[in-house]
Amino acid sequence: MPEYPHLGWNPVPGSPSAIAALQTKLSTSATALGTAHRLVDQLLGESAYWRGEAADAFRESLDGDLPRDLKNAHRSVSKAASKLRRWHDDLVGYQATAKKYDTRAMLEQAALTRAETQHERVRTAPDLPESDLAAATAAVTKAREALESVRRLARELEETHRVEAGRIAKALNEATDKLAPQEPGALSNAMDWVGDNLGDSLSLLSASLGLIAIFVAAPVAVPLLFAAAGLSLAAFVSHTSDPKHDSALKAGFTQGKFDGQFWSSVVTLGGDALGALPGVGAVAQGAKGMAAATRAGVAAEQGASATFRSGARAFGVDSTAAMREADAGPKPVLDWVVRKTSPQAEVPLQAGVAGSAVVTSGIGLSPADDNDAVKNTATGVDGARLAASDTPGAGINAARTWAQLAH
């Protein structure tokens, strides 16, 4: 059955829900591209203070066309998302108008049917004056004109819809032609590079968010910490499926080949796991609170909607509190250094540790990673950081989380 049965055709085809879904995906992609561009730009700026061969290789890997291509792609996708959002709103309006026309067509068709019935009755009735037949004929003509008027409005709406759809399509093509990277395959090459180095890219993003979280206010830091933990978990999954790490670990445990690649894989996976642990613990704590709130809601017969809201609220509150507690939890080595020096040294020390994670993650993405001396040095720095900072604190937080969940 057509969507507008009384008009007889659909003058405004299109699916607002499908357009909204596509616009949401484009907006999400634009946000991700913008974040990637800002992080690359920020990393390049911060690396100005880093000297040496590894620093030059790191800057070279991030510099060049990549920042420009990411910026252009962000602008292109953002503009396309904006055009789709406008088209969605226009289409919703067009279809609402078409529904009104269809309703009017239904009423005018009913009026025409009544007029035709009356005309036929008058025409076949004996001894009725000619004036009655003329009036009935005029009523039929008027009803037909009214119905045709509505259909004419629908055809005008159809033309407006066609012209605007063409304009939007042209605007989307121009967004790609004018703002996307002009060199064929430049953005594709950049995305291929990210795909080939997905695990290391996720680790770098996680370390960067962890560094930024040190300098921002608590309400902003908590979402950054959750994002960093999620990226670490994704990096762990990616690295565990990387044949390079898989073969290095197998060679170590089965052949006793405990070389630089083996320890690099151990430190990489260990760092990813420790980075994900606060997020896993916070989510587990939130899930526990959600389960308790849901049980209480069911017992109080609050209803499904109210029970869901109270459970979601408990999840948000408890997981946020758990993440804050994990972030503020004891860090034995750093705490000892602060006690031996000055309280003012705490933030610089944390920034230094987090910054070292950013630097070593960046090396893994640069040509310097092929240099055994640089790579082994980065592994040593990472190993020292994990042993002195991340592992003790993570162990304490994990024990505390386990004890809370056990109750």
Image: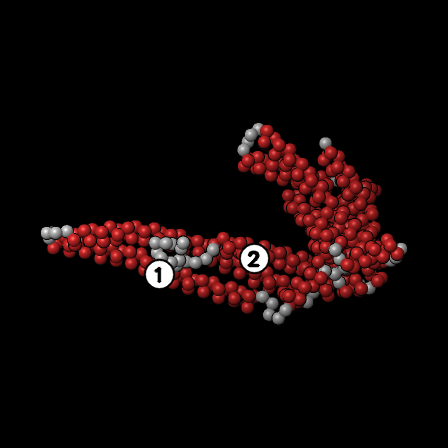
- Farthest residue, direction bottom: 183
**Closer to viewer: mark 1 or mark 2:** 1
Q: Nearer the viewer, residue 380 or 106?
A: 106
Q: On the picture, is 307 further left or further right than 279? A: left
At 85% across and 57% down in the image, what residue appears? 251
Image-quadrant location for residue 312: top right
Determine if residue 81 is in view.
yes
Protein image colouring: secondary structure
Q: Indicate the position of residue 361 as horizontal and vertical percent values.
A: 75, 56
At 29% across and 58% down in the image, what residue appears? 148
Quadrant in the picture for the C terminus: top right
Q: On the picture, is 70 further left or further right than 156? A: right
Question: Which secondary structure, mark 2?
Answer: helix
Question: Which secondary structure, mark 1?
Answer: helix
Q: Nearer the viewer, residue 203 or 15?
A: 15
At 77% across and 65% down in the image, what residue appears? 367
Q: On the picture, is 162 further left or further right than 275? A: left
- Kindly identify the amino acid type of the residue bearing the numbered disc 1: Arg
Q: How many marks?
A: 2
- Kindly identify the amino acid type of the residue bearing the numbered disc 2: Leu
Check residue 155 in the rendering and tell me which mark sits there, or answer none: 1
Q: Indicate the position of residue 192 as horizontal and vertical percent values.
A: 68, 64
